[in-house]
Image (cartoon, rainbow, N blue to C red):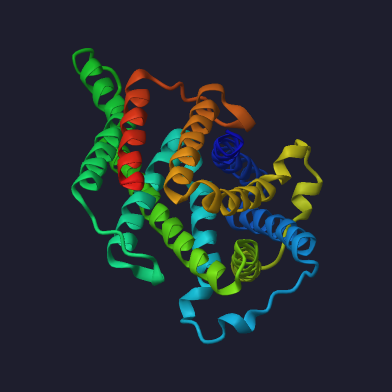
Amino acid sequence: MFAIIIGLSIGVGLPIQTAINSRLRTLLASPLLSSMISFTIGAAFLLIVNWLVSGKAGINLSLAANQPFWIWTGGIFGVIFLTGNILLFPKLGSVQTVIMPIVGQIVMSMLIDNFGWFFSPKHTLGFLRVIGALLLLAGVFLAVAARDLFASIRTSRLQQARPSSSNRLLSWVWRVSGFVIGMFSATQTAINGHLGIILHSPIKSALVSFVVGTVVLWLLVLIVEHGYHLSIAAHQKAPWWIWIGGLIGALFVLGNAYLVPLIGTGLTVVVVLLGQIAGSMLVDQFGWFAAKKNPVDLAQIAGIVLMVAGVALIKLF
C-alpha cells in the first residue's frame, strides 16, 4: 500500500511541476531559462542524494566507455520533454498537456518493447495490447476532441462565435507536438534504464541524465538568450514554490527508480499514470499554481477512464 501511495504522489507531482515551471517561464519570459533553473535544481538534489546513498558524489563513467553514443542522450530528451511541456501548458491546459504526451509515451514504449530498441527486453505486440491501444485512442478522443465537437454542435444553430479553422488547426498542431514530446520521454526512459544497468544504479543514471540536460540548457541559454538574465526575477515578487519544479522532477525520477524493482514496471506505470491524470484534473479544475481554470467535464472523465483501461491492458499483459 505504501508503494501505491508513493506512485500516486509522484504522478500527481508531474502536472504540478509543469504548472510551476510554466509560472516560472512567465516570470522569466523564457522557457529555456525556466527549464535551465529546473534542471539545475534537480541535478543538485540528485547529486546530494547520490552522495548520501553511495558515500561519494562522483560517478565511474568508465563503465559506459564502450557503449553506443545514444547512452548519453537521455538528458537531451529530458530537456525536450520538460521545455515542451512548459510551452504546451498555456496552450492546452493541464489535462491535455498530460494526456497527449502520455499517448506518445505509450505508442513509443510499445514500439521499443516490440522491437527491443535501446537493448530493452522484447515484448511482442499481442491481441490484448492492440485492444488496449484502441481503448487508449478512444479515451483520447473523448478527453481531447469530444468537448470541441459537442460545443460545435450546440453552437451551430445559434450562430455564435466559433473558433476559426486556423485556430482549430493550431490547437491540433500543439496536440501533435505533445504526442511527439511524449515519444521523446519514452525514449529517455529506455535509455536511462539501460544506463542504470550499466552504472549499477538508477540514481546514478538519473543524475547523469540531469547533468547532461543541465549542461545542454546552460549552453542553449547562453547562445539563444545571449547571457543569463536572472536579475529580472530578483526584481519581481514571486511565491516561494516557483523554484521547486526541479525538485519535484527529481523526486519523480527517484520515485520511479524505487518503485520498479518493488512492484514491477507495469504496475508502476499504471499507478503513476493515475496520479498524473488526477493531478492534471485538479490543476485544471481549481487553477492551482496560477494556472488557467479549465473545468473538467463528463466526457473528459469518461475518456480518462478508457485511457486508464487501455494503459492497463498495454502495460500489464
Front residue of 242/195: it is: 195
Determine whether, in the image, residue 109 is placed left or right of residue 295: left
Most distant residue in the top direction: 158
Where's the N terminus, which quadrant? top right
Front residue of 148/13: it is: 13
- Would you identify the image quadrant in which residue 169 lies? top left
The picture places residue 119, in percent across and down from the top left corner, at: 40, 71
Relative height, residue 17 to residue 194 (above, below): above
Relative height, residue 52 to residue 298 (above, below): below
Determine whether, in the image, residue 240 is placed left or right of residue 116: right
Task: Kindly identify the residue that appears in the image at 78 percent across and 64 percent down.
Answer: 51
Q: How many marks?
A: 0
The picture places residue 284, in percent across and down from the top left corner, at: 50, 28
The picture places residue 201, in percent across and down from the top left corner, at: 62, 66
Task: Kindly identify the residue that appears in the image at 32 percent across and 24 percent down.
Answer: 302
Relative height, residue 280 to residue 73 (above, below): above
Front residue of 243/58: it is: 58
- Would you identify the image quadrant in which residue 44 lies? bottom right
Front residue of 8/78: it is: 8
Determine whether, in the image, residue 274 is placed left or right of residue 56: left
- Would you identify the image quadrant in which residue 138 lies? top left
The picture places residue 297, in percent across and down from the top left corner, at: 38, 19
Task: Kindly identify the residue that appears in the image at 31 percent across and 52 percent down.
Answer: 107
